[in-house]
Image (tube, helix red, strand yellow):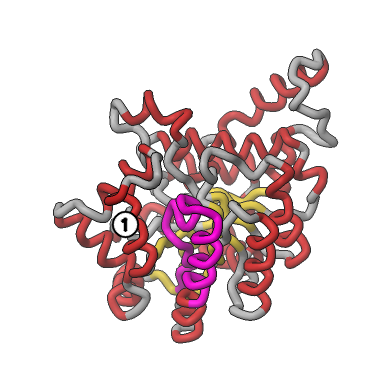
Amino acid sequence: MYQRIATEEAFGTAELFERYRAILADGSVNDPGFTSLMGFYLNSSAPGIVAVRERMLDLGERRLGDMDSTGIAKQVLAVTSPGVQIFDADTAVGLARSINDELSAAVKKYPQRFAGLAAVAPQKPVEAAKELERAVKTLGLKGAIVNSHTHGEYLDDPKYWAIFEAAEALNVPVYIHPGSPPPAMIGPFLERGLDGAIYGFAVETGLHLLRIIVSGALDRFPRLRLVAGHLGEGLPYWMFRMDFMHRRMVAASRYASVPKLARQPSEYLKDNFWVTTSGMAWAPPILYAQSVMGVDRVMYAMDYPYQFVPEEVKVTDELPISDEDKRKLYQSTAERVFAL
């Protein structure tokens, strides 16, 4: 009845990892979240982490074998967090181009199995917009990946809106993927080991998504399509309260930085966003997200290779939904959103 398309699947390149190791070694980047995340994944000798690292670099037979063993027909590939956003601007721009070239080559080699999202460097928004256009029109990639904050700054700032403008004009989505909390936020998370996927990712990225909504960016770019993993980083559960409190604070003119919007925050979440099941192989929240956002707003993802647990595919296979809705979850929504 359907093909399984996994829509948040990570990869890295040898060049990217070499550059990560270099800045970890020389201490040129003061970002505790990056040190915690990549310091661990690039250096741990634990067998499970070594396997993640090896799988990340493989865009060939091993990855395809893992896909075959779990019934995954296609992966939508995106560079692992933090992508190029940890580097200085010039390094990031050049590295995004080389990552996209390598990704495009893999997609062209296995066009039935892979699609890709372009890395961009928000450090130079105009250059990021140009690279997105090149990636889509020349390389055949299907949108952009932004690994949340860039040196503690978020895409709600109008200086970054060249990226949104390009994505809307190209009619491609921007996937807002988690990053580790920035230095100004990370302290309480790091001291209890909560900075990563266990919780810190969701808090930081949910904040980013909500900042975009309340900034008015989606009134400026009403056709912009945004994708968020992990079932929306918690925001679907907050829709009623977001609307109530936003309405109250705007009526009271509490914050000069919060403009009146054309619609309620929840309406932007339901109209401009799609969410994926990455890392959330659990029926109750999947069904809840479908109920409040719409069945055609939720897409399947595995979160490979960070969460490569083959038996978790059964969770979505066995959801108590119709075959038609299961086809939307696994295949047809992804085909529409990413133009596959």
Task: Name which residue lies at 27% across and 61% down.
Answer: 53
Q: Is residue 149 left or right of residue 219?
A: left
Give the class, few, some or many, for how many residues have Cα within 10 Å of label 1's Cα (few <14, many ≥20). Answer: few
Q: Is residue 83 visible?
A: yes
Instruction: Check the image and report above or below for 298 versus 93.
Output: above
Q: Is residue 288 visible?
A: no
Does 97 lie within the magenta span?
Answer: yes
- Give whichever of 297, 263 is nearer the camera: 263
Task: Name which residue lies at 46% across and 72% down.
Answer: 74
Report how many numbered discs are placed on residues in the image. Answer: 1
Q: Pick the quarter of the image with the C terminus.
A: bottom right
Q: Secondary structure at mark 1?
A: helix
Instruction: Check the image and report above or below for 209 versus 18.
Output: above
Instruction: Check the image and report above or below for 202 versus 63.
Output: above
- Give whichever of 28, 59 is nearer the camera: 28
Indicate the position of residue 179 as horizontal and vertical percent values.
Answer: 46, 45
Does 24 lie within the magenta span?
Answer: no
Using the rendered view, name the quadrant where residue 174 is placed. Answer: bottom right
Indicate the position of residue 203 as horizontal and vertical percent values.
Answer: 48, 33
- Give whichever of 174, 43 is nearer the camera: 43
Task: Name which residue lies at 33% across and 54% down.
Answer: 307
Using the rendered view, name the quadrant where residue 325 is placed. Answer: bottom right
Q: Is residue 133 left or right of residue 277?
A: right
Label 1 amino acid?
Ala
> Over which residues does the magenta segment extend?
74-101
> Mark 1 — residue?
22
